[in-house]
């Protein structure tokens, strides 16, 4: 009986995990808002900040 | 699927370029990332102006080092340091000329990225050379004082003027980039573009606006817009890496040409002659080292990459 409850519990957890993962899964063909925003912020590094400095190395030993 | 294949190809080229650098890792990942921005008109201006400013700041620091060396030992031979500083002054002029030339002619992204990577590499080499020569002349206890002296002088008229130009070009670059992205999203906002140009809003606010505009799109349009923006960013990144690899492959051949041109700009005849002699000796040493290594690990990537 305990084994049956254990199996049912594992299956339930797996089912819940599957349902939660589905909307953001790449294989689903869909695209979540969160995923797209994340992708955009990762890929778009092209705006420049005004305080950027360029390093060419120290002169003092 | 097609876009994914293109992206995969671009990533493979980038991976190849990274592998090529692993053989002779002279052009840093930081320079390659900076080079990506130099692929646009205003981006090239920003990068070359930032380089000019860094060289100007290092010249100020270098002069403080020479002063400290003389203070520590009045009979110290600082000719070598002064020769390197003279070459750095000439390099600064070279950067400025290159920037003006890029601004006046029809813009070529590959040429702009190449010029930036080469000149930055020259600046790093000269700074390294100066630091190595200074080691024998400056006492360790004076190093802190040298930095303090250099920091006091960092707000020269020249640096201030360069800061102003950099700020203006960064704003123009961000405004142009925003216009491109808004076109992809299909959400024009002339007011925001004007605010970016005038400096009334910053990069963070612009990024937030772009993200908010994308959220308003429906799922399919959003996916397309994100893919297009991402693809464009990848293209720039690949261009930076590929051109850096080309520069590395031909660096030794072209370095001498740049140096010869630079030396002619040195006004002091005596210093010019010293720089010329040192340059000849260094070229010989490099040729010998290359002969010994028989070109091991030489990068042969020769791809013309452009961004429209």
Image (spheres, coloured by chain):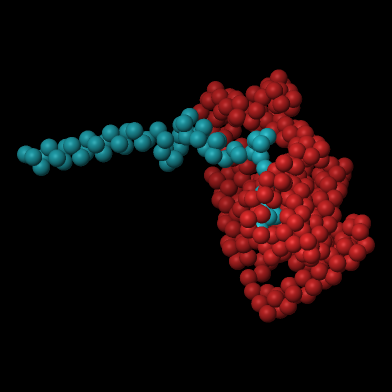
Chain colours: A cyan, B red
Q: Is residue B305 something one can see in this rendering?
A: no
Percent position of residue B121, x then y: 72, 57
Please name the residue shown 59% across and 33% down the image: B225
Judging depth in this view, the residue of B282 and B225 nearest the camera is: B282
Instruction: Mark yes or no: residue B56 visible.
Output: yes
Residue at image point 64% right, 48% down: B33
Quick one: which residue is furthest to the top in this view? B191
Where, by quadrant of the figure, is residue B241 drawn?
bottom right
Residue at the image position 66 percent from the left and 24 percent from the top:
B201
The answer to which image quadrant residue B204 occupies is: top right
Extreme residue toward the left, this view = A1
Query: Residue B181, how many percent across, how many down?
Result: 65, 32
- State which quarter of the image contains the C terminus of chain B: top right
- In this rendering, the answer to whether A42 lies above or below B10 is above
Task: Single out the residue that lies furthest toward the bottom.
Answer: B292
The front one of B77 and A37 is B77
Above/below status of B234 relative to B139: above
Image quarter hosting the N terminus of chain B: top right
Q: What is the tally of numbered marks visible in this picture? A: 0
Percent across and percent down for residue B169 are 76, 35
Q: Residue at x 31, y 37 (%)?
A: A18
């Amino acid at each position: 009986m305990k084994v049956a409850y254990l199996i049912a519990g594992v299956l339930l957890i797996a089912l819940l995990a599957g349902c939660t993962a589905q909307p953001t899964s790449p294989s689903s063909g869909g695209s979540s808002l969160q995923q797209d925003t994340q992708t955009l912020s990762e890929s778009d590094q092209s705006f420049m900040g005004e305080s950027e400095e360029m390093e060419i190395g120290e002169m003092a030993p | 699927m097609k876009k994914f294949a293109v992206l995969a190809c671009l990533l493979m080229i980038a991976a190849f370029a990274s592998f090529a650098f692993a053989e002779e890792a002279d052009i840093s990942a930081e320079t390659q990332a900076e080079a990506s921005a130099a692929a646009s008109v205003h981006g090239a201006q920003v990068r070359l102006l930032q380089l000019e400013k860094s060289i100007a700041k290092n010249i100020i620091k270098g002069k403080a080092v020479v002063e400290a060396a003389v203070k520590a030992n009045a009979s110290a031979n600082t000719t070598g340091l002064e020769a390197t500083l003279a070459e750095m002054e000439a390099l600064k002029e070279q950067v400025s000329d290159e920037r003006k030339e890029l601004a006046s002619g029809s813009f070529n992204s590959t040429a702009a990225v190449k010029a930036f990577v080469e000149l930055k590499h020259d600046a790093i080499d000269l700074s390294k050379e100066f630091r190595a020569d200074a080691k024998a002349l400056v006492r360790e206890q004076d190093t802190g004082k040298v930095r303090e002296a250099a920091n006091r002088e960092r707000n020269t008229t020249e640096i201030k003027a360069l800061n102003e130009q950099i700020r203006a070009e960064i704003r123009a670059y961000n405004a142009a980039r925003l216009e491109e992205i808004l076109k992809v999203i299909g959400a024009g906002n002339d007011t925001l573009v004007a605010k970016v140009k005038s400096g009334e809003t910053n990069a963070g606010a612009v990024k937030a606006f772009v993200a908010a505009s994308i959220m308003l799109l429906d799922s399919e349009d959003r996916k397309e817009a994100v893919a297009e923006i991402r693809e464009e960013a990848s293209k720039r990144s690949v261009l930076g890496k590929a051109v850096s690899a080309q520069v590395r492959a031909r660096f030794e051949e072209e370095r001498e040409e740049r140096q010869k041109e630079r030396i002619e700009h040195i006004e002091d005849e005596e210093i010019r002659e010293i720089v010329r002699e040192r340059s000849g000796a260094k070229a010989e040493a490099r040729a010998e080292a290359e002969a010994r290594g028989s070109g091991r690990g030489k990068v042969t990537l020769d791809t013309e990459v452009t961004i429209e």
